[in-house]
Amino acid sequence: MLGTLVLSAMLLVLEKMLRLFDFVATEGGPVSVVWRMLANLIPEYLSLGIPIGLMLGILLAFRRLATSSELDVLRGVGMSFGRLMRMPYVFAFALALLNLAIVGFIQPYARYAYEGLQFELRSGALGASIKVGEFTKLGSRMTLRIEQSFDDGRSLRGIFVRGENDDGQAVSATAAQGQFLATDDPNTIILRLTKGVLIHESPKFPVPRVLTFDNHDLPIPLPKIEAFRTRGGGDRELTIPELFVVGRDKSEPLATRLETRANFHFRIVEVASMFLIPLLAVALAIPPKRSTSALGVFLSIVILVTQHKINQYAEDMGARGTVDPIIALWVPFLLFAALAIWMYYTLAHVPGGQPIDALERVAAKAGQRVKALFNVFGRKQKPA
């Protein structure tokens, strides 16, 4: 179960990693921020990874008992399915509490931190890098271009810089080398240029002044960076108690109340669904007699992902006001609960009951037809 949980979370993270690398590179931020952003996305992915891990952990354990006939022995000595389900429900209860903590309290703060990192990247607060061979704007009145960069940007070669003032004066400089230096003023840095030429233009000068220098310090004012907004810019940044309060606040706009109510019920349904997973996992784990088909493993993933997507669609409908959020989210949950309970009841209390027997037969016949088709195709390809 733990292995499946880690694997599913890593697969979801890898899907996002490439897009984050592209985004950070486009904004010119340090690579290290990618790992910080991914760390803030892990709680969101765990909210789906935990149910998948619980489902596959229980399913594979009972499948092994069934295919090795140990389950028949346990049933033969008087152990009912109700007795066997105690330990799966211990795991389900513990993981449901963990998932509630994640989706209800940890994920909102992680999402806010993720949005904050995106804001800092766009605003330059994370120290946007100067790209080699491109003109980079430093504030609204200064442009810089470099040909080469060494030591993580501390040593620059082939520098061109141009700055302008409000009174019409402009300074352009080229230099063979340069480096950035910190000052006592946190809003200003020094660009120390070495071996270059400086051109000073002004409406007061009939011709620009030109001078050569061995060393020249050019102060660069850093652009002012806005403070990031407070948490709560979206329903995904609110905890479950905050969603409940906002959803009942009559002073809030109707659209905001619908969004928060829909998200509140979405999170509760996602947690409540975990108590149905043991029933569904056991029903899908036990194949028909004399069968080793893994159809149940495939169906378990399909059912979980489908139920999750249905909940997301229902949340959108509730947020738009098309359907009341309670109806939009709890009706699919009740249908999912009815399916899980029926499958478990058929397996545990109906003599010879096998809820996926019909699907097993259909899958077996489909497999035989596909195999026969490939055999025919293979014979046609053989030379005469």
Image (tube, helix red, strand yellow):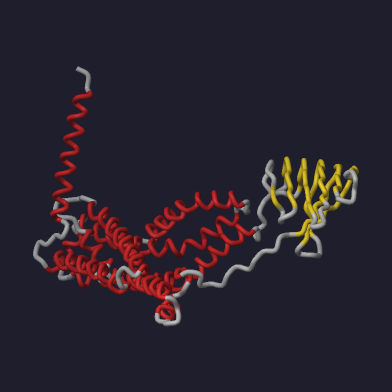
Residue that lies at the very extreme toward the top in this rendered image = 384
Q: Nearer the viewer, residue 62 or 311?
A: 311
Name the residue rendered at 37%, 57% in the picture. Answer: 4
Q: Position of residue 199 (x, y in %)?
A: 85, 45
Residue 213 seen anywhere in this rendered image of the structure: no
Q: Quadrant of the N terminus?
A: bottom left
Q: Tell me where residue 320 sits by quadrant.
A: bottom left
Left or right: 221, with 105 as reference point? right
- Dividing the picture into quadrants, the one containing residue 76 is bottom left
* Outermost residue, left side: 351
Regarding residue 219, the answer to whether it shows in the image is yes
Above/below status of 185 relative to 324: above
Q: What residue is at 45 percent from the left and 70 percent from the top?
A: 235
Quick check: 67 left or right of 175? left
Q: Residue at x 38, y 73 (%)?
A: 258
Residue 23: x and y in percent read 55, 52
Q: Quadrant of the C terminus?
A: top left
- Picture quadrant of residue 122: bottom right
Q: Is 281 left or right of 119, judged from the image as shown?
A: left
**Residue 66 placement, left or right of 311:** left
Q: Whole-percent x and y of residue 303? A: 27, 59
